């Protein structure tokens, strides 16, 4: 269930400016010890369990919080409930195991082994099978605008997080690698995965974070958790409401502006808020921006009229895939796509165009005022309980945190 609100400089105060180093500091501070609130639950790799350092107890006025780095993505979780410690450990263990399952880069991961297979039929784990199944579904639905076999082309491009430097690969190389991109050469039958061609390689970067946050939600709700907020590299998943029954407020990052500059906010419970954008992983060359979302028809970054696409809905994996598809298809193409696939009732999409004007689809509170809202940098004090939501696949920093935490360098939030 979502409600929208248009930013109001005076009343909806958001001053979420979490520069990367500061968030690192925040985490470092917690590791070093946030007074008596820090508790090391597990610190053993040999048991297969993730090292987990948390703060808080899970009480309504003292949420349990944890941040961890997996698949190059900072994950932060806030949990409420008397079994918060146990649940947090479960989440951390799952993240750890997914890093060893879904990563195309990590040489020890299951997907890496699949991509470097010697036989063209392999048996894969349930999670890998399910994530590939979801990826294939959106590859088919989008007729290849989303294509989970993008890896050979993606590997030619070098999109360094934060450096914004890179070189355009040779066109001949792009065309050569593009021949290997074709999701129709991948077939899944239960846990049996087969490839028509030995050079087909899978990359789940466009859907894995959504898949994982969806699984974390399933786990937590199955365990009886009624209040939690999960932030996977900027993709936010709300579980229930805050303990006082009020909704979570999620802030959407303004593209190409300082991290933490909020474009707009929305209040939500039990939804995921997932963005794709062209402003996190990109470089400029000859005045042109080359970003990390590739058009599988050309092998080049998608020519798009959008800086960002944000998808709000119940299905996290869908949101992740759809946000990526939105960048490739552009605003009109995506609207047609959503209508054609009857997704307008399950998903709400925020399109942010090249001048950072934005509009919701299909329901658009800003449009009811006759104009598209312009992005605003909100600086005020009423910013507690807001998660800044921005985009970055396999990013390296926490994308969002509670403003109170950042300002005080403490994880003791005022819920
Ligand atoms: P996202 O940030 O969710 O939009 O995902 C971007 C990531 O998805 C990239 O870093 C690639 O790993 C992968 N990717 C890029 N272009 C595509 C595409 N057209 N279809 C599927 N995955 C893609
Ligand atoms: Mg995506």
Image (spheres, helix red, strand yellow):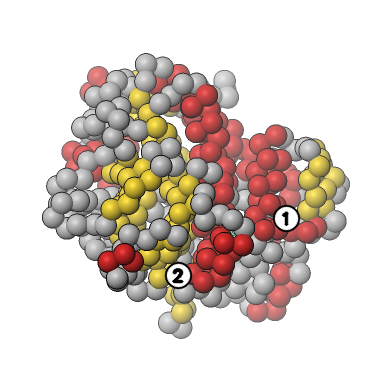
Tell me the distance, in whole angstroms, between the alpha carbons under discs 1 and 2. Answer: 28 Å
Classify 370 as above or below 206: below
Could you tell me residue 335's position as x and y percent?
Answer: 52, 66
Evaluate whether residue 54 shows in this view. no
Closest to the observer, 60 or 348? 348
Reading the image, the residue beneath label 2 is 306
Residue occupying image coordinates x 64% and y 39%: 101
Q: Secondary structure at mark 1?
A: loop
Reading the image, the residue beneath label 1 is 201
Residue occupying image coordinates x 57% and y 49%: 318
Q: Is residue 20 left or right of residue 123?
A: left
The picture quadrant where one finds residue 34 is top left
Binning the other alpha carbons within 10 Å of mark 2 as few (below 14), some (14 to 19) or many (20 upward) gives: many
Dot 1 or dot 2: first in sequence order is 1
Could you tell me residue 308's position as x and y percent?
Answer: 43, 63
Closest to the observer, 82 or 165? 82
Q: Which numbered tag is attached to residue 89?
A: none
Residue occupying image coordinates x 32% and y 59%: 365
Closest to the observer, 282 or 335? 335
The picture quadrant where one finds residue 287 is bottom left
Q: Is residue 114 left or right of residue 355?
A: right
Classify 298 as above or below 163: below
Classify 170 as above or below 336: below
Q: Image quadrant for the N terminus? A: top left
Could you tell me residue 117's position as x and y percent?
Answer: 79, 47
């Amino acid at each position: 269930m979502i409600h929208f609100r248009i930013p109001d400089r005076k009343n909806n105060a958001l001053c979420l400016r979490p520069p990367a180093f500061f968030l690192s500091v925040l985490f470092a501070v917690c590791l070093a010890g946030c007074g008596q609130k820090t508790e090391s639950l597990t610190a053993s790799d040999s048991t297969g369990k993730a090292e987990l350092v948390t703060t808080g107890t899970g009480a309504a006025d003292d949420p349990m919080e944890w941040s961890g780095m997996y698949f190059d993505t900072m994950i932060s979780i806030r949990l409420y409930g008397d079994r918060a410690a146990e649940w947090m450990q479960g989440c951390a263990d799952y993240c750890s195991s997914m890093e060893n399952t879904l990563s195309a880069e990590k040489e020890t991961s299951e997907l890496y082994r699949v991509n470097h297979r010697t036989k063209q039929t392999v048996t894969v784990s349930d999670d890998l099978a399910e994530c590939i199944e979801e990826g294939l579904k959106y590859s088919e639905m989008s007729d290849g605008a989303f294509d989970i076999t993008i890896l050979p082309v993606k590997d030619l491009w070098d999109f360094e997080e934060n450096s914004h430097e890179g070189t355009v690969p040779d066109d001949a190389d792009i065309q050569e690698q593009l021949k290997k991109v074709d999701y129709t050469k991948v077939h899944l039958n239960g846990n049996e995965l087969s490839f028509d061609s030995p050079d087909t390689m899978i990359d789940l970067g466009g859907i894995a974070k959504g898949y994982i946050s969806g699984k974390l939600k399933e786990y937590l709700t199955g365990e009886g958790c009624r209040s939690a907020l999960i932030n996977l590299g900027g993709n936010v998943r709300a579980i229930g409401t805050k303990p006082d029954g009020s909704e979570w407020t999620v802030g959407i990052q303004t593209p190409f502006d300082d991290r933490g500059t909020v474009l707009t906010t929305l209040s939500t419970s039990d939804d995921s808020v997932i963005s794709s954008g062209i402003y996190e992983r990109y470089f400029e060359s000859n005045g042109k921006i080359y970003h990390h979302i590739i058009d599988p028809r050309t092998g080049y970054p998608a020519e798009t009229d959008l800086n960002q696409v944000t998808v709000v809905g119940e299905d996290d994996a869908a949101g992740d895939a759809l946000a990526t598809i939105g960048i490739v298809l552009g605003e009109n193409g995506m609207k047609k796509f959503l209508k054609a696939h009857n997704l307008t009732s399950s998903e709400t999409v925020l399109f942010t165009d090249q001048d950072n004007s934005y509009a919701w689809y299909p329901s658009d509170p800003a449009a009811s005022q006759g104009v598209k809202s312009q992005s605003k940098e909100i600086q005020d004090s009423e910013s507690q309980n807001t998660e800044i939501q921005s985009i970055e696949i396999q990013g390296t920093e926490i994308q969002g945190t509670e403003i109170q935490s950042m300002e005080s360098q403490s994880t003791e939030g005022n819920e």
